[in-house]
Image: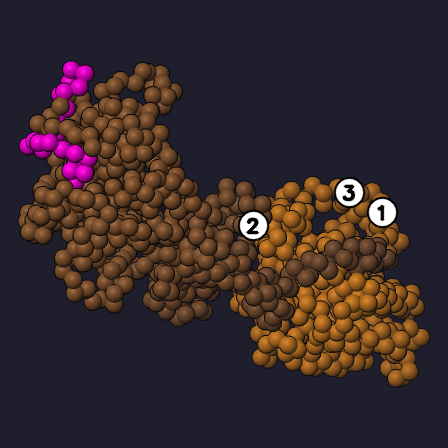
Chain colours: A brown, B orange
């Protein structure tokens, strides 16, 4: 008897604290109060991404025999595969028995009915309210918004205690970039539970701190047009304000539905998205690195004018081809005759720029292109941006251990060869270039202060000359004349970039896949532009046909909004003021504006 | 034989101890169940106690020699009762232990415990020498083995084990020879591996979880763990009646019955446990004193049989509550809720009183 009393002494006096703690652990259960993620709003406060309450179905596994017995009924009632369910239960074998597992992340109304009506005979099911992300349907802005998912074990490890397993974090896009703001802090409720886990009282509660909403620079209306125009194509649209770097619209197609990720994507779906030959998961706006085609001529013009290596009134006679280093480089189906710099841009004359390129030399071209922002990341606030590439002698030596061939310079001159750019990069660089060499880092979050800028001041004359020529592209019977916008100083440059050499094209014999990539970069107004739009349509053929109209629609919508939807009464596009344009072009302008556009010429293959 | 002993000859000290234990038991039954759907249990227990007192008085008025003379008949009835239970008994918690009698469920094995005490007392008393022969031992063993086997079949290992100490204590007092004792212990040890195969899965589980409680925190080791948590968290003064979380929230298994001491330890602390164990010690000592003062060997064996059985109950139950013994389902006498067990206790006390009342007679 005294031995037993000693036993009580040991438990109640010596180890009392430990058992007191255990009793407290028994009694008190900490229930997380999930903090809703911050919403995403467009620049006018319209909701783009928000949350909705949803119910997860939990399986309580305290009584494993009962669970085993009830699984077929549960599988039947919840429309789940019994094998999957068994597997899930088996996989959870290592977890403590009292820890329930989620067997269905989003309960349908009929699932909820099933649980409610079988409380007595299937007492092992419970529902947990959680917030789920709601994205616009149909992949609208999906690449920019990104998606959320359960935090990976690696992230938990790296976070230094900030994340805990089961947390929902941003996996891609803005969700990932601004996860910190969006995520919020889960609260917790301490409740008293009885031995069967039923809540019988509440101790205290730490409220959840909801994630902060983020207001995007995106304009829903412009975004909608970008999405609509791109639908069914492969490509990207980036519209931004070059004066402050705010992204107004950013679309990439084909897309995916981030709502699929918000619940829990099945392995099959994930596999399908990843192996889809159209690569819907790639954000083409920041990740498609492609040859810029004739858009590159703008950079070359800047190099020519700024370096003064070639006189501005340099002229070339274009017979439709040119021969350099023993090889023939084609220009167009027809010759351009005598071409000066302005006309060379307006008509996108390759022969002119072959000659310019040859005289500038690759290093000078490379220097200016790099200074103007190509070949490096723009620094946009999205994860996964690609830097593009501007080739140089040094680059070729470093990467390929080969000498630069002068013939390569000729290809580079018209935006072919090794040069690659992303749509965001084009909007950023052209926007900065035509703004006088002030490059505002693109960003997607509205903030009071303008984003960091990189300056490469260009002379007033250079900017004026280039914007004049780009105005001409749209308004002077240029390559994008069909995209002219009456009353708006809409300027731009087309690009049609080869995907593969003509030779390779014949070998491949799949013309559909290998159509040229269509580019267009446009802006308005001509001086101090407010909006610049870069459009890429892969396999779209001519930039003027596939890409320019999309930019035009967005610029038009931008102005429609600005002027309250009313068209300005003035129908004739304002004439350029600064530069004495060629008289002939000026005279023709008003009549030719309505004629069929002159197709941009297919640049010759570099290897021919 | 004439009636003897007036109201003053009853063992009032023993009764005072019994009432104290019952009072603490009622308080703790109330505390453990008042906030649950089992509320009101203390009143049912009180009525069992009162009914038990009536039976105690009745049995104390009979001469125990008369009862002992009927022991073989009672034994026969007991065995028949146990067979009936196995045949048509009521099953609860996976064991067939109950027989419906007058709208109540009677646990026949509780009464059989009493019958065994009577039978053993008569048997040992009839051994006229100081030395128990091996043949006598075999007879005792066989007589006990029949009801014990039947109880094991229910299955009810706990109650079956309770029969053993009465045999052992009786044999000791009757003068068992050392070589016989050693032989029996040896045989018993050899039976253990065989017995292991006979155990039901839940019984094996209880034994293994007793040996390794951490391996099965939610199974039967869970009960022991929760009991220990209740006891340990009680501290010296306890959390107060009705305020033990382990008890009130139902973490302590069958807190109003087998684990009532855990509930008590949590709410009344070490102090409460100390008083309770003191009361049980006093109860046993008082019984042993009565046995010493018995008029004859039969009376002595009778009271010692009761003391052995009650003592075994207390020891096993208390040890179980603090995890020193596996969970066996043996209630704490006079405290745990339960009609049959309470009846057994008061009938047994009636026998003790009976022997006491007749100590000066003849």
> Dot 2 surroundings within 10 Å: few (below 14), some, or many (20 or more)?
few
Which of these two is toward me, B325 or B132? B325
Residue B212 visible, this orientation: yes
Q: CA distance from mark 1 to mark 2?
A: 74 Å
Pick out the residue farthest to the bottom. B7
For the point 33% across and 46% down, the residue is: A435
Quick check: A286 left or right of B225?
A: left
Q: Which residue is mark 2?
A: A162
A285 above or below A352?
Answer: below
For the point 56% across and 62% down, the residue is: A187
Q: Which region is colored magenta?
A: A323-346
Asked which secondary structure carries label 1, the reply is loop
Q: Which residue is mark 3?
A: B183
Q: Quadrant of residue A353?
A: top left
Asked which secondary structure carries label 2, the reply is loop
Quick check: A120 left or right of B96?
A: left
Quick check: A244 left or right of A202?
A: left
Measuring from the top left, give residue A389's x and y in whole percent: 33, 31
Q: Which residue is mark 1?
A: B177
């Amino acid at each position: 008897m005294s031995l037993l009393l000693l036993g009580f002494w040991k438990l109640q006096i010596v180890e009392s604290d430990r058992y007191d703690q255990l009793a407290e652990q028994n009694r008190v259960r900490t229930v997380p109060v999930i903090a809703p993620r911050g919403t995403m709003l467009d620049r006018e406060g319209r909701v783009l991404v928000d949350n909705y309450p949803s119910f997860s179905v939990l399986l309580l596994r305290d009584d494993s025999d009962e669970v085993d017995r009830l699984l077929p009924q549960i599988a039947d009632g919840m429309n789940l595969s019994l094998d999957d369910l068994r597997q899930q239960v088996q996989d959870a074998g290592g977890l403590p028995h009292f820890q329930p597992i989620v067997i269905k992340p989003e309960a349908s109304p009929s699932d909820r009915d099933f649980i409610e009506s079988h409380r007595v005979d299937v007492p092992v099911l419970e529902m947990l309210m959680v917030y789920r992300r709601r994205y616009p349907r149909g992949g609208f802005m999906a690449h920019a918004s990104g998606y959320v998912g359960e935090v990976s074990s690696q992230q938990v490890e790296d976070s230094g205690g900030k994340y805990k397993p089961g947390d929902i974090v941003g996996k891609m896009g803005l969700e990932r970039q601004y996860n910190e703001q969006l995520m919020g802090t889960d609260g917790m409720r301490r409740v008293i539970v009885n031995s069967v886990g039923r809540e019988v009282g509440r101790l205290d509660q730490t409220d959840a701190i909801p994630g902060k909403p983020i207001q995007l620079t995106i304009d829903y209306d412009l975004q909608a047009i970008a999405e609509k125009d791109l639908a069914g194509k492969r490509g990207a649209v980036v519209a931004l304000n070059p004066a402050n770097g705010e992204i107004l619209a950013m679309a990439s197609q084909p897309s995916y539905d981030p709502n699929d990720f918000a619940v829990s994507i099945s392995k099959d779906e994930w596999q399908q998205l990843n192996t889809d030959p159209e690569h819907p998961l790639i954000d083409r706006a920041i990740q498609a690195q492609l040859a810029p085609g004739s858009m590159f001529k703008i950079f070359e013009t800047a190099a020519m004018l700024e370096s003064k290596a070639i006189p501005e009134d340099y002229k070339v006679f274009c017979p439709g081809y040119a021969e350099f280093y023993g090889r023939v480089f084609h220009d167009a189906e027809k010759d351009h005759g005598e071409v000066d710099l302005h006309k060379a841009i307006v008509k996108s004359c390759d022969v002119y720029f072959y000659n310019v390129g040859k005289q500038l030399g690759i290093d000078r071209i490379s220097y200016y292109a790099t200074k103007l922002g190509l070949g490096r990341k723009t620094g946009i606030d999205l994860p996964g941006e690609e830097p593009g590439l501007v080739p140089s002698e040094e680059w070729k030596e470093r990467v390929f251990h080969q000498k630069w061939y002068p013939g390569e310079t000729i290809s580079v001159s018209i935006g072919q060869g090794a040069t690659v750019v992303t749509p965001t990069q084009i909007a950023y660089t052209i926007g900065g270039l035509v703004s006088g060499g002030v490059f505002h880092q693109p960003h997607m979050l509205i903030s009071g202060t303008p984003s960091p800028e990189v300056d490469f001041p260009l002379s007033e004359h250079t900017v004026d000359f280039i914007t004049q020529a780009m105005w001409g592209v749209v308004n002077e019977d240029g390559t994008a004349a069909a995209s002219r916008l009456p009353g708006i100083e809409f300027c731009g440059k087309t690009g049609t970039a080869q995907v593969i050499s003509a030779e390779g094209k014949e070998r491949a014999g799949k013309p559909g896949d290998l159509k040229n990539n269509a580019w267009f970069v446009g802006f308005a107004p001509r001086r101090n532009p407010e909006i610049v739009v870069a459009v890429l349509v892969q396999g779209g053929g001519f930039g003027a046909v596939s890409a320019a109209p999309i930019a035009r629609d967005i610029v038009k919508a931008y102005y429609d909004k600005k002027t309250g939807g009313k068209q300005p009464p003035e129908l004739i596009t304002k004439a350029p003021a600064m530069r004495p344009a060629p008289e002939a072009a000026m005279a023709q302008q008003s009549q030719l504006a309505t004629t069929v556009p002159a197709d941009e010429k297919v640049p010759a293959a570099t290897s021919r | 034989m004439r009636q003897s002993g007036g109201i003053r000859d009853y063992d009032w000290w023993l009764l005072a101890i019994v009432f104290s234990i019952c009072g603490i038991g009622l308080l703790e039954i109330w505390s453990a169940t008042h906030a649950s759907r089992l509320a009101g249990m203390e009143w049912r227990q009180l009525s069992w106690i009162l009914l038990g007192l009536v039976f105690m008085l009745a049995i104390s008025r009979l001469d125990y020699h008369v009862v002992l003379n009927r022991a073989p008949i009672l034994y026969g009835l007991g065995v028949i009762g146990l067979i009936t239970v196995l045949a048509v008994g009521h099953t609860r918690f996976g064991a067939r232990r109950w027989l419906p009698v007058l709208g109540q469920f009677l646990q026949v094995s509780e009464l059989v415990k009493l019958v065994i005490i009577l039978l053993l007392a008569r048997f040992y008393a009839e051994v006229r020498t100081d030395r128990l022969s091996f043949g006598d031992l075999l007879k005792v063993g066989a007589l006990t083995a029949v009801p014990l086997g039947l109880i094991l079949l229910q299955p009810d290992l706990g109650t079956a084990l309770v029969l053993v100490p009465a045999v052992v204590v009786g044999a000791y007092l009757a003068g068992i020879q050392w070589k016989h004792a050693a032989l029996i212990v040896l045989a018993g040890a050899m039976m253990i591996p065989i017995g292991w195969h006979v155990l039901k899965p839940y019984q094996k589980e209880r034994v293994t979880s007793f040996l390794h409680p951490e391996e099965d925190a939610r199974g039967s080791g869970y009960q022991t763990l929760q009991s220990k948590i209740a006891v340990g968290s009680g501290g010296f003064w306890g959390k107060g009646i009705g305020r033990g979380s382990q008890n009130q929230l139902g973490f302590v298994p069958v807190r109003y019955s087998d684990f009532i001491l855990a509930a008590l330890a949590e709410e009344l602390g070490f102090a409460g446990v100390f008083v309770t164990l003191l009361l049980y010690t006093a109860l046993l000592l008082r019984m042993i004193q009565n046995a010493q003062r018995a008029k004859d060997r039969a009376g002595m064996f009778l009271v010692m049989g009761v003391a052995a059985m009650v003592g075994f109950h207390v020891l096993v139950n208390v040890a179980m509550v603090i995890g020193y013994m596996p969970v066996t389902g043996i209630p704490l006498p006079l405290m745990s809720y339960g009609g049959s067990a309470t009846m057994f206790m008061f009938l047994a006390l009636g026998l003790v009183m009976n022997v006491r009342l007749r100590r000066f007679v003849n």
